């Protein structure tokens, strides 16, 4: 696959801006879902949305830099940006876990299951990409 276009700083910035926009829109969608599922259990949707919007830009930048570093085989940089992305990724989920009260077991289990599944799928993709990158070195 020819990825020479991604080496351009101009293209990276364009991708980063689009990714920021996508993360912001996804944050609004998630806030709507949180309102419909967790608001009645004490989670303040507006606080959740504010947290999500505050971390959206640094999260989007760190994830895009993580992907760029992987593509360019800068594995030390990818680990650093990946760690930052992970930190930002879980902040909204931590807010839900910290503020939700008397959540039905099935909803709580479903939330934890969804977080775990998406975490495992993301980690699997990263491992596959890193192994493929190392094989080409």
Image (cartoon, helix red, strand yellow):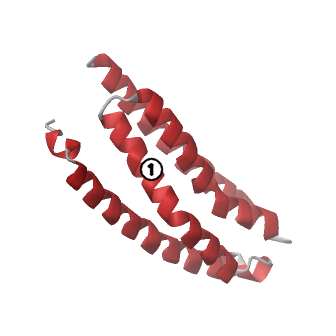
Is residue 110 visible in this depiction of the protein?
no
Report which residue position mark 1 lands on. Answer: 63
70 relative position to 59: left or right = left
Q: Estimate the x, y position of residue 93 in percent, counting from the top left.
A: 67, 61
In front: 39, or 58? 58
Q: Is residue 136 above or below residue 26?
A: above
Q: Which residue is at 40% across, 65% downward? A: 20
In front: 58, or 34? 58
21 relative position to 1: left or right = right
Q: Which residue is at 42% across, 42% downward? A: 66
In front: 112, or 131? 131
Classify residue 102 by image quadrant: bottom right
- Residue lying farthest to the front in this orientation: 9
Q: Estimate the x, y position of residue 113 in percent, counting from the top left.
A: 64, 53
Classify residue 99 by image quadrant: bottom right
Q: Estimate the x, y position of residue 95 in percent, counting from the top left.
A: 73, 65
How many numbered badges does the structure rendering display? 1
Is residue 87 visible in this depiction of the protein?
yes
Q: Which residue is at 55% across, 72% downward? A: 53
Q: Is residue 127 above or below residue 33?
A: above
The C terminus lies in quadrant: top left
The N terminus lies in quadrant: top left
Q: Estimate the x, y position of residue 103 in percent, counting from the top left.
A: 80, 70
72 relative position to 108: left or right = left
Q: Is residue 112 above or below residue 35?
A: above
Q: Is residue 131 above or below residue 22?
A: above
Q: Which residue is at 45% across, 71% downward? A: 24
């Amino acid at each position: 696959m020819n990825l020479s276009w991604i080496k351009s700083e101009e293209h990276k910035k364009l991708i980063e801006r689009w990714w920021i926009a996508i993360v912001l829109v996804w944050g609004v969608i998630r806030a709507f879902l949180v309102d419909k599922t967790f608001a009645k259990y004490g989670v303040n949707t507006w606080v959740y949305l504010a947290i999500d919007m505050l971390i959206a830009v640094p999260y989007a930048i760190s994830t895009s830099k993580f992907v760029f570093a992987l593509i360019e085989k800068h594995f030390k940089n990818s680990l650093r940006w990946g760690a930052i992305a992970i930190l930002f990724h879980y902040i909204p989920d931590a807010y839900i876990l910290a503020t939700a009260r008397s959540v039905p077991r099935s909803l709580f289990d479903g939330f934890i299951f969804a977080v775990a599944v998406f975490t495992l799928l993301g980690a699997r993709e990263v491992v596959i990409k890193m192994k493929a990158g190392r094989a080409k070195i």
